[in-house]
Image: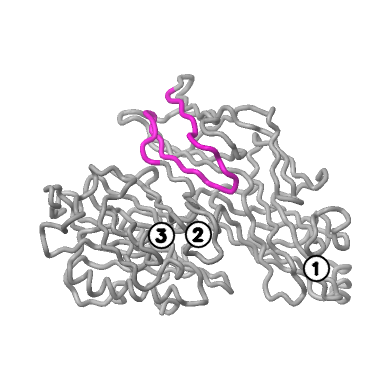
Amino acid sequence: MLKKLYFSSLIVLIALSACNKEDDQLHNLQGVPVSFKTSVFEGVKTRVVGVNWESGDKIGVFAIENGRTLKEETIIENYDNLSFSTTGNGVFTHNDQAIYYPEDGSTIDFISYYPYQSSLNAYNYKIDITEQVDLMYSNNLKNSDKNNAENNLDFHRVLSKVVLNIEPTESGSLEGLTVEVNGVKTEAAFSLATGELTIETESTGKLLFTPLGSDVNKSVTFLLLPTTEENSVEVVFKLGDKVTYKWTIPHALQGESLYSYNINLNGISSEVLPATSYMELPYYTKGGSAPNSLKALHMVGSTSWLNGYSGSNTMRNYTIMFDTENSVPYWIAYPMHSIFMRSGNRTNDWDFDPIIPKKYQPNIVNSGWTNKKYNRGHMLASADRSATRDLNRTTFYATNMAVQDVKMNSGVWNDLEQDLRSWVEDSRYDTIYVVTGVILPPKGQIEYTTDVDGKEVAIPKYMYKALLKQEKSSKKWHSIAFNMKNITSGTSYDKNVVSVAELEDLTGFTFFPNLGDATEVKSQTSLSHWR
């Protein structure tokens, strides 16, 4: 079975090659077997977390006529639900039969899924949610022929995934904790031909899980069928036979999505952030929530300025984790892309963040800090969100500001921001994932300035950026990080390079967790791939 690893990622190369004498003969007649590069996505092109291959895992593959629906008469040759397996190294080979492109040069489409089932009824995959099988589906590879330089199969999770990070009351323990999930639909059929999920409405049941972790911090991950109604799924937390807390998921669950909740046995401890699978989102390395923290996910409003894009409120802008005790952002995480940037449109419309409670925010709407040595330093730069004035206004929220040395802000920090915007224009890459944050001195050594109301706001000792991007052609990932003292200094940013791994040790956050086992990527300190 597919091993479940929380916050790991998947990039799989599938080589469909001949392995016996009969296949060698086919090779001579039909050319090179088809090969695929495969990625697994969740939601809007974000890598699925929680999966890794084990030896013996199998996928199923269909090859059909270009532009046709999967059915018996459209399947090419006998490429019908062929199985391919792996030894656990991420490379798949066929078990009985390879696939070859037609010699006449005609194009074909591919459909694939995981995990493999040898028997399918009318190309329907039966789902029993009590088995907790993470069904994934790919139908993106179309109009493919033997001249294709690359074949990419993009797998998407069909089900909804839920993660609960659980803490006890202040003096309590989680020893013996179980979690019961009630009111769930348990059976469904997924059409490999159309990609549609049909849920058996009468199949209602419950699931029972034992969370893993310590007596003061446990987590549990489970799969559910998508829902259409709010508050339809009840979660019951029990210590032994005693019901400690009951809670209902307050919204409908969408397929392909991951939902993460921080819960203590008195209730929800912080705002829920669906779509925690965004590549740029860090998590607190110790588990649960960082001390005195609130999160807010800011979405793009009107997207009429995006050519070829329709709809609204479906594109993320940035996510913030705010330190409510020190009134500074722990970090701001966001995607960087040229679509967000345009010359002009700076608003200077300083305002309070509409999501974070106003009582935690510094009042810097009409003036800056009382100590004029420091600026209201943007974490997400104004010029990084300048496509429209409405978008730009979101960078002037008080929660996006840190107490930053004036000359640093206009000097070496500004140099880094400008160069980052130029790196985004490199056509070899698409999105750059960015986390910008602050590091405070140890408690007891923190210095403060104040806002106009006299609220104390911590002065960061360091300000940092962690960056990640992927090559379009090779799919290789590159990372780099910068950690700069919040002082008047002429030291250029390239003298303050650290690895992402080093920055994780300094901050207590795990960056780009969806990369999974990415020790090599996170150890990089060379700027050769950046400028």
Residue neighbourhood size for the residue with mark 2, other residues' Cα within 10 Å, grouped as few (<14), some (14–19), many (≥20): many
- SS label for mark 3: strand
Q: Position of residue 354 (x, y in %)?
A: 32, 47
Q: Position of residue 300 (x, y in %)?
A: 43, 56
Residue ranking furthest to the top:
241
Residue neighbourhood size for the residue with mark 3, other residues' Cα within 10 Å, grouped as few (<14), some (14–19), many (≥20): many
Tell me the amino acid under the disc marked 3: Tyr
**Residue 258 is a magenta residue:** yes
Counting the numbered discs, the total is 3
Tell me the amino acid under the disc marked 1: Ala
Residue neighbourhood size for the residue with mark 1, other residues' Cα within 10 Å, grouped as few (<14), some (14–19), many (≥20): many
Q: Which residues are magenta?
A: 244-271
- SS label for mark 1: loop
The mark closer to the camera, 3 or 2, is: 3
Q: Residue at x 49, y 30 (%)?
A: 248
Instruction: Specify the quadrant that holds the C terminus.
Output: bottom left
**Residue 399 is a magenta residue:** no
Q: Is residue 210 above or below residue 6?
A: above
Mark number for residue 99? Answer: none
- SS label for mark 2: helix
Q: Alpha carbon of mark 3 to alpha carbon of mark 2: how far?
A: 16 Å
Q: Position of residue 215 (x, y in %)?
A: 40, 34
Tell me the amino acid under the disc marked 2: Leu
Earlier in the chain: of badge 1 and badge 2, it is 1
Is residue 429 toward the left or the right of residue 492 in the image? right
Mark number for residue 515? Answer: 2
Q: 12 or 111, which lies in front? A: 111
Q: Residue at x 74, y 46 (%)?
A: 191
User: Picture quarter containing residue 200?
Assistant: top right
Mark number for residue 18? Answer: 1
What residue is shown with label 3?
A: 334
Q: Alpha carbon of mark 1 to alpha carbon of mark 2: how far?
A: 31 Å
